[in-house]
Structures are given as C-alpha cells and as structure tokens.
Amino acid sequence: MNTFSSSVATAFSLITSFDPLLGSIVLRSLAVSALACLLACSAGLVLGAWLGVSRFRGRGVVLALLNTALALPSVVVGLMVYLLLSRSGPLGFLGWLFSFKAMVLAQAVLVLPVVMALVRQTIEDADRSHGEQLQSMGAGRFLRSLILLWDERYSLLTVLIAAFGRAISEVGAVMIVGGNIEGFTRVMTTSIALETSKGDLPLALALGMVLLGVVLLLNVLMALVKRWREMLDDAAPTPAIQGAPL
Amino acid sequence: MSSLFNLRAVSVQYGSGKSRVQALVNCNLQINAGENLALIGSNGSGKSTLLRTLHGLLAPSSGQLEIDAKARQAMLFQRPYMLRASVLHNVAFGLWLRGTPWSQAKVDAMNALARVGLLDVAARNAKALSGGQQQRVALARAWACKPQVLLLDEPTASLDPSAKREVERLMAEFAGAGMTLIFSSHNLGQVKRLASRVVYLEHGVLVADLPTHDFFNGPLPAAAEHFLKGELG
C-alpha cells in the first residue's frame, strides 16, 4: 500500500473509532465557530437590517467599506485582533490572547461583515418592494427593519449557514490569536496545517474529511432551506394577480 | 363639508440633476370629506405620486400641502404586502402598528375579516391566498383601522373580473358608510360607478377636475378628451 492509501485508511479508522484527540479538535472547532457566528449574527442581523432601510450622508462610503471587508483576509483579521488583545493593546487587560475566547472574537470579526453585507442586501431589496406599505401602516425605519428581518427569516437562514461555513473553514485568524496550543486552542484547520507540516498525514486527512463533511452538511442544509422556501412560495399562488412577484 | 386636503401649487420631483423627474407640477386641489375622488391618466401621469403625497409618503418639493391631521388615513396598494403569517395576524398586525394592544387587535381583526367575507380563511397563510383575496385582506387591514380617508392605488388593476367585482363592492360599501375614497384607476367603468369627482392628470399636470357626470358628458380640455376617446375607443 502506498503512503496515500495507507494514510486514507488510517484517517478512516480514526474517524470510525471516534479517536478522542480527533473528537476534541472537531468539537472545539464547532464550538468556536458556532459561538463566533452567534456573536456576529446578533450584531450583524440588526446592523445589516438597519443599514438596509436607512439613508444617510456617507452611506455609500460605509457600503463600500463593508463590501471591502467581505474580502478581508483572515490573517489580517487575526493580526488586528492580535494587536488588540496583545499585552500592550487596548484590550490587553482581558488576557484573552492565545485562548478560546480570542479565537471566537477573531472569527466573529471575520464573519461580521459577511452577515452584515448579505443581510443589508436582503433587507434593502425587501424594503424597496414593501417598505412603503409598512411605512403606510405606521412602522418607522427601525421597526421596519425588524419586521423585514422577521419576514425574510428563511432567506436569512442561508446567510447564517454561509457565515458558519466561512468561520469554520478559516485558518489564519485562529492560528495567530489562538496559537494552535494542543488541548486548548487547536482547531481543525490549524491542526491540518500543523500535522501536514509534521508529516502526520492520517490525522490531517481525517480532520480534512471531517471539515469537508461539515461543509458538505452546510451545503445540504442550504439546499434544504432553499427547497423549503420554494415550497412555501409554491403554496402561495396568486392566480388573480398577473405578473405579480411571488 | 370639511376640507381634508388642500394643495396649493404642489410639485413633487424625484432625483436630482440630470436624472430629475418632475412627477407632479403645480398641482392645486382641494378634497373634502365624503367625496369619492378618482384619479385617472395614462401611466406616468402622476396619479400614484399624488396619492403618495396625500398619504405623506412623499414630501412636496415646492408648494403648500395642508392635511387634516385629525382625519385617519389608510392606503391600499396595487400589490398588497402580506407578511409570512396567518391572515388574522396580517390584519391584526396593521392595528398593532397603530398602537392597539395585540389581544384587542386580534378581536378587531376578526371583525374586519368578517366584514370582507374572509373569516373562513383567518388561520391560513396570507401568502397562500389568491390575488383577489389578498386585496380583500388588505382592505380588511385598512378598514380595521377605521380610517376616514382611504387612498387606493389601482386597487383592482390586474385582478380577475370576479375579484375585481368583489373589491369594487367593498369599496362602494365603505364609501356608503361615509368613508372618503381617493383612488386611481384605468378602469373608466369603475370610475363612473364609484367616483363622485374625477381628476385627470397628464405628465404631472392636473388637466381636469370635474364632477363625474360632467367629466364623462361635458366638454373637456383637449388632452383629457383625447385620453377619454382612446380609453373608450
């Protein structure tokens, strides 16, 4: 058996035997990314929705910056959070550097623009179609953003799933602020990088497979959400309105 | 009759610079309580702009607009917005937004749905209703707020004939109950049936403002005459 096939076989056995080391890394990864998404979505949903309905001087600049932040490399985010949390940084007093919390913070910062930008676009489109009617019923700008946020919940589920996908698959930010410390801050992506450089291909491969599995699961979830939405829309025919958008 | 709206040389424009569009030009109009006013004119003539201005959704760029603040208003749009919620909740939601407590809003919403004959679909998803039913839900939502003035932007456009008849019947009922209706329409038959006064707009300019009988039988400015011939022909 060559190196590749034996590594794959060992990787499979690590997964099927629920290897404790593998399990702890996977669980830590999921926890970091889930918490980061929770934080980013708490702020991003409200801020993105507000940005979708608000009009103010300089809004174009804010949107340009937000869209730029979408392409922010994760290592740059890692560096920024590192500087913030380092002993001489403004948040150094927290003592979070090289900890689980630092990784959550870094991923939240990374994912926040993704959530905000996608939510902003969804809510802005909805507001263009329905905002006037909500305004007519007495809903002010902020309330309108919350109503549309609720009404577009199925579209926004896809945003949340996409954000989680971005968080769980990044490596640069968590590597810099977490330090890849075994048993504490080692997550799937940082482990894959480390184990590959050490030549321990089976563990790297096993983690890669799990990561791929998670991403695949997210894609399946996105497809299911899309199908669910289509089913809801299909249940809403408007035969008497010709050409009305559904 | 008390005056609900008084417009003096009101103009409304969209955009600025080269992309500026003058949607309403020096419009003078007084609308009194109890009138049923129809706004007619071709697409882009300023009907929807005028309705939105009266409803406070658009601000005049010049001129003076006086609105009787005590007169409650509601507006119905061509394609009503239905939340992803039940029919009952859609109607109750409109009331809740205007300050009615949720429990009371649901009671009032049931009454409003009974009024438009949709009590049997109260629990259904509003988005799953037909276009005509959705427009009736929107009418119930508007009626539930007990408005003195109901503005309707082409409420029956693109509805099928039976849905059109049903919506028109409800509009007539509301007007009969003393509500002031201000509606835009391309349907001249509907205008004849429902309106007591007709305003004809062209390119944002108010060209004719006459009682319905005079509009359809009397002499008209050339532009209005031309429009009428085209529509009736």
Image (tube, rainbow, N blue to C red):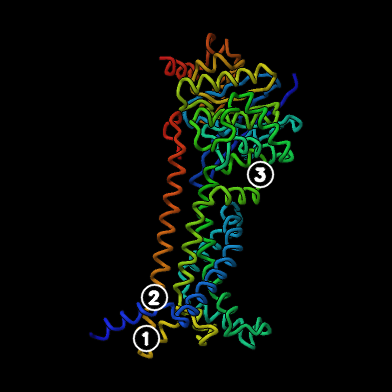
The answer, for residue B149, to whether it is visible in the render is yes
The 10 Å Cα crowd at callout 1, few under 14, some 14 to 19, many 20 or more, is some
Residue located farthest toward the top when viewing the structure as drawn: B217
Left-right relation of B100 to B74 = right
Parent chain of label 2: A
Task: Indicate which label's residue lies in the foreground, 1 or 2.
Answer: 2
Vertical comparison of B118 with A198: above or below = above
Instruction: Give the residue at mark 3.
Output: A139
Q: In this view, does A179 lie above or below B116?
A: below
Quarter of the image where the N terminus of chain A is located: bottom left
Q: Residue furthest left?
A: A1
Task: Confirm or deny contact between disc 1 and disc 2 (CB under 8 A).
Answer: no
Q: How many marks?
A: 3
Q: In this view, does A45 lie to the left or right of A241?
A: right
Q: Nearer the viewer, residue A186 or B139?
A: A186
Instruction: Give the amino acid type for the residue marked by disc 1 in the picture.
Output: Thr
> Quick one: label 2, few (<14), some, or many (20+) residues within 10 Å?
few
Label at residue A16: 2
Q: Residue A205, image x and y in percent? A: 36, 79
**Kind of residue sitting beneath label 3:** Ala
Lateral position of residue B131 relative to residue A45, left or right: left
| For marks 2 and 3 on the same chain, the one whose residue lies earlier in the sequence | 2
What element does badge 2 sit on? helix
Q: Name the residue under label 1.
A: A196
Looking at the rendered structure, the secondary structure element under dot 1 is helix
* Crowding at mark 3 (Cα within 10 Å: few <14, some 14-19, many 20+): some
Residue B105, image x and y in percent?
A: 70, 36
Helix, strand or loop at mark 3: loop
The disc labelled 2 sits on which kind of residue? Answer: Thr
